[in-house]
């Protein structure tokens, strides 16, 4: 048992590392006090988390605090908080310098705006999954994904999330097995979001993060988590042994489409190997669920082949034309999905594929086109012309991919 928390430092006005001027306390966490601070030389506002002095004397808490800096600093993504510096106060207590993020947690945001429309749930879920996809590609398992560790900001085109708190993260699998969690042990993690394998004492993996995202989505769709409201020992046993009711069954008045049941229940499979193979695959499945739900309620008009947004390949050109970012193109796809118009969906996917093709990212373009064909096929036979254009482009990029010399430094992430 640790003594009561004491201030990590004297407070506003203190200067850390000769350049960070502490302004106001903006939060208190289990590991430290978070300040808004100003970089005296750059006139930049940042957030600084100073570790509670009584915890800094404990080796395990010190390791976790340092691990947060290593894990979050291992990769960069627009939907994950950026770690900018790590140092110690004049009294020797460690502190983290982070990007300053303002806004409610996803938990509070969802409660304020409930019920969230399906397209917004998909947009928020995709942002979280692509942040995790970047983390996983860098060998980082977050190991504590939950709605309280996601901040929702106001973006140019809608809500934009930031994933926080990598204090329990695992880098390159660097953790040994541990005893199963039971009522006598302190829990490292949050029972409501904890994957069965973690409860059983195994090391968290990428699949464990996906299970937690499944819980986040379940909460966004239904307004509650699957086993919430019970003593934590019962919650742990439920994650291990009880089937999760489909979201549409748990909350039938919400009108949750069956496609979302399938996605969420796949993420919440008891066995890690039965979940999605990656965060990116999960994100694509979530998007397809939205498409299926829209297509099931709207007629699909014919595609006018003359309105396709596909551009010809600039053959023999050493410098491909400047194109919009894949992020903006994905927003265009999301808008087309909301409208449910097959020709717009096909055109948006074609523009994304052409963007990737112009950059030499042929395999990624082929993946997007294959998904587009699955999506547009829902509207067949009215979408036959759209399908033919998608298939023609897919044949082209597959041919180009087969002749491409792989390069280790290619960065062709369509997300």
Image (cartoon, grey):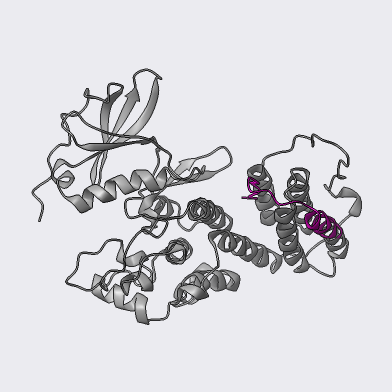
Residue in view at x 73 percent, y 66 percent:
374
Residue 231 in percent (x, y) is at 23, 72
Q: Going by the image, does 342 lie left or right of 124? A: right
Q: Is residue 393 magenta?
A: yes
User: Does residue 252 show up?
Assistant: no
Locate residue 346: give its quadrant: bottom right
Residue in view at x 65 percent, y 52 percent:
334
Q: Residues in magenta?
A: 392-415
Image quarter in which the N terminus is found: bottom left
Q: How many marks?
A: 0
Q: Going by the image, does 409 lie left or right of 70? A: right
Residue 92 in percent (x, y) is at 18, 34
Q: Is residue 117 above or below residue 159?
A: below
Q: Is residue 375 above or below residue 313?
A: below
Residue 250 in percent (x, y) is at 45, 75
Locate residue 37: give its quadrant: top left
Q: Going by the image, does 328 lie left or right of 175? A: right
Of 348 and 91, nearer the camera is 91
Of 358 and 107, nearer the camera is 358
Residue in view at x 37 percent, y 51 percent:
149
Q: Is residue 256 magenta?
A: no
User: Does residue 305 show up?
Assistant: yes
Of 399 and 355, nearer the camera is 399
Residue 157 in percent (x, y) is at 59, 41
């Amino acid at each position: 048992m640790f003594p009561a928390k004491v201030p990590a430092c004297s407070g506003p006005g203190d200067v850390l590392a000769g350049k960070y001027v502490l302004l106001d306390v903006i939060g208190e966490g289990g590991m430290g006090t978070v300040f808004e601070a100003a970089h005296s030389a750059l006139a930049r506002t940042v957030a600084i988390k100073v570790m509670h002095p009584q915890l800094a004397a404990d080796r395990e808490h010190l390791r976790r605090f340092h691990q947060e800096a290593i894990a979050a600093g291992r990769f960069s993504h627009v939907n994950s908080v950026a770690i900018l510096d790590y140092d110690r106060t004049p009294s020797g207590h460690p502190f983290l310098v982070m990007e300053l993020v303002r806004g409610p947690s996803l938990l509070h945001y969802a409660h304020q705006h409930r019920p969230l429309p399906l397209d917004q749930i998909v947009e928020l879920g995709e942002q979280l999954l692509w942040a995790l996809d970047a983390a996983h590609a860098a060998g980082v398992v977050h190991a504590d994904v939950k709605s309280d560790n996601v901040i929702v900001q106001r973006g140019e085109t809608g809500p934009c999330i930031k994933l926080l708190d990598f204090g329990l993260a695992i880098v390159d699998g660097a953790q040994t097995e541990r005893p199963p969690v039971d009522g006598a042990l302190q829990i490292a993690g949050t029972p409501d979001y904890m994957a069965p394998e973690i409860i059983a004492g195994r090391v968290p993996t990428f699949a464990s993060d996906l299970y937690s995202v499944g819980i986040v989505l379940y909460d966004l769709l239904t307004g509650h988590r699957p086993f919430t409201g019970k003593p934590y020992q019962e919650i742990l046993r439920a994650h291990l042994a009880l089937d999760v009711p489909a979201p549409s069954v748990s909350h039938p008045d919400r009108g949750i489409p069956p496609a979302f049941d399938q996605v969420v229940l796949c993420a919440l499979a008891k066995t890690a190997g039965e979940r999605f193979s990656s965060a990116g695959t999960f994100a694509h499945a979530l998007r397809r669920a939205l498409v299926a739900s829209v297509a099931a309620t709207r007629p699909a008009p014919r595609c006018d082949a003359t309105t396709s947004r596909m551009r010809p390949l600039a053959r023999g050109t050493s410098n491909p034309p400047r194109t919009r970012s894949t992020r903006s193109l994905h927003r265009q796809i999301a808008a087309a999905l909301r409208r449910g118009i097959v020709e717009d969906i096909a055109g948006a996917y074609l523009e994304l594929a052409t963007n990737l093709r112009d950059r030499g990212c042929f395999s990624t373009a082929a993946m997007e086109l294959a998904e587009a064909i699955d999506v547009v096929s829902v509207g067949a036979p009215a979408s036959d012309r759209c399908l033919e254009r998608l298939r023609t482009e897919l044949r082209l990029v597959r041919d180009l991919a087969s002749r491409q010399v792989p390069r280790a430094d290619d960065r062709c992430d369509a997300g």
